Amino acid sequence: MFPVVVGINHHTAPLEVRERFNFPPSIVQKSLQDLYAHPEIRGAVILSTCNRTEIYAVTTEIEAGMAVIKEFMSRRAKMEQRELAQYLYMHTLYNAVRHLYRVAAGLTSMILGETQIIGQVADAYEAANQAEVTHKVINVVFQNSLSVGKRVRAETGIDQHPVSISYTAVELAKQCYEDLYGKRVLILGAGEMSTLTAKYLVEAGASMVMVSNRSFDRACALAQEFNGEAVRFEELEYRLPLADIVISATSAPHYILQPRLMKKVMAQKEDKTLLLIDIAVPRDINPAVRKILGVTLFDIDDLQKVLDKHQHLREIAAQQAESIIAEEMTQFMKWHNSLSVVPTIAALQQKGQEIKEHQLNRALDHLGSLTPKQEKIVRSLANSILNQVLHTPITRLKDAAETSQGHMYAEILQNLFDLETQPADHLQTSRRGTAE
């Protein structure tokens, strides 16, 4: 059985193309069953997110299986295969497994190391289980991929370094205040950046969110999302003293907060400290306010320095993650190679047992009446001879299974002993892999 993957993602296709390949949860199981109905496909998983659609499968014949998947994707996108080809990537055998491990680890994500993907991989695998279209190899590969994703994050910390402007702004706020619980936040602007920042601040424990925007209706809408309060722009002078943290992300072409205003604000503040984070371009806050006692100001360049550092740390973590994946691939390859020799070993042992029993029964008939002890000695001798004869070829075959020559050794042994083997699908395996 051969693992394969055919996919499209944000590296290979624009959003308007990716949208055509999307599989919403409501149709995933039916789509999986349609794909599984093809005799070439013995197991399948559809991983469909906003940034990728990937179809993983186990197939009896690589080219035929890939052709089925490409035709399946072509029908989904209502796109001719010639046009489709420019957007697709394909991996087979161990490259397909390695690709999934890297996906689960977040190494192929738009944001390096992001955590959401591991849940999406788990959901995709669960949908395949519910549709009853999995296979022993699919089970091992996907269970291992989830373990790899968790191991990468636990050992490298790749997801511990924020790489978005909004999240980094909140992290800077945490550095200035050990605890954001109970802190009062004033958001200037009601766009996407402001919304994300407000979301992260509330998650971090901010107890009060005020939103001010030149469009009061938009300020009201954003404030309502966070059970906060909308503030009219002309009332800023009176509300700023109530804030501990000000996040500014408007589209104004000039400074909104000037030193003269901020001196008045600081004179009215009880604790005499205020954190200003300006994530607007052009800037909303005059840099001269840094000179005011008690004011701390970070602008977009300050945040970018942190982001650059965090991106560098994620890239270092990604190198560590690749080493972990290489280790995990070695384990998988040993298991997968063993599949080719397990039926041969089972057939050899069975044939040896049949020969032993036949010859043993003939010998016992010729020997006539034996005491139980004598018969036990004869049977023990037969078992010992069989085990010693089979020990070396079985050991050598197991050793060969950990190399690319496992298939060849198995075929030679089958020919030498005229063995009839059953497909590995009928035999139990253990993880790493055990098909749990």
Image: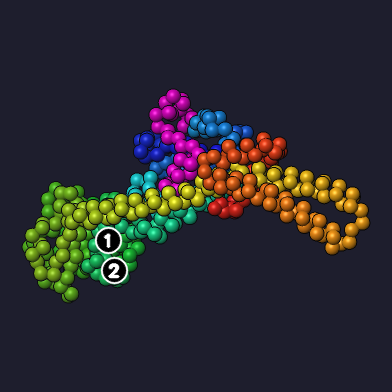
| Viewer-proximal residue among 254 and 362 | 362
Rendered residue at 66%/46% (across/down): 345
Answer yes or no: is residue 195 visible.
Answer: no
Looking at the rendering, in which quadrant would you find the N terminus? top right
Rendered residue at 33%/65% (across/down): 204
Q: How many marks?
A: 2
Mark linked to residue 17: none
Magenta segment, prevailing SS (helix, strand or loop): helix
Residue 309 placed where, x, y %? Answer: 24, 55
Q: CA distance from mark 1 to mark 2?
A: 9 Å
Give, as a single range, the part of the protein colored magenta: 74-103
Q: Is there CB contact under 8 Å for labels 1 and 2?
A: yes
Q: Residue furthest bottom?
A: 270
Answer yes or no: is residue 13 visible.
Answer: yes
Residue 107 inside the magenta-drawn segment: no
Disc 2 residue type (three-letter)? Leu
Crowding at mark 2 (Cα within 10 Å: few <14, some 14-19, many 20+) = many
| Viewer-proximal residue among 298 and 89 | 89
Location of residue 202 (image quadrant)? bottom left
Helix or strand or loop: what does disc 1 sit on? helix
| Viewer-proximal residue among 407 and 431 | 407
With 318 as the anchor, is 339 left or right in this view?
A: right
Q: Earlier in the sequence, mark 1 or mark 2?
A: 1
Picture layout, residue 175 above or below residue 221: below
Location of residue 156 (image quadrant)? bottom left
Residue tagged by mark 2? Answer: 180
Mark linked to residue 170: 1
Disc 1 residue type (three-letter)? Val
Rendered residue at 82%/46% (across/down): 358
Residue 87 inside the magenta-drawn segment: yes
Rendered residue at 45%/44% (across/down): 98
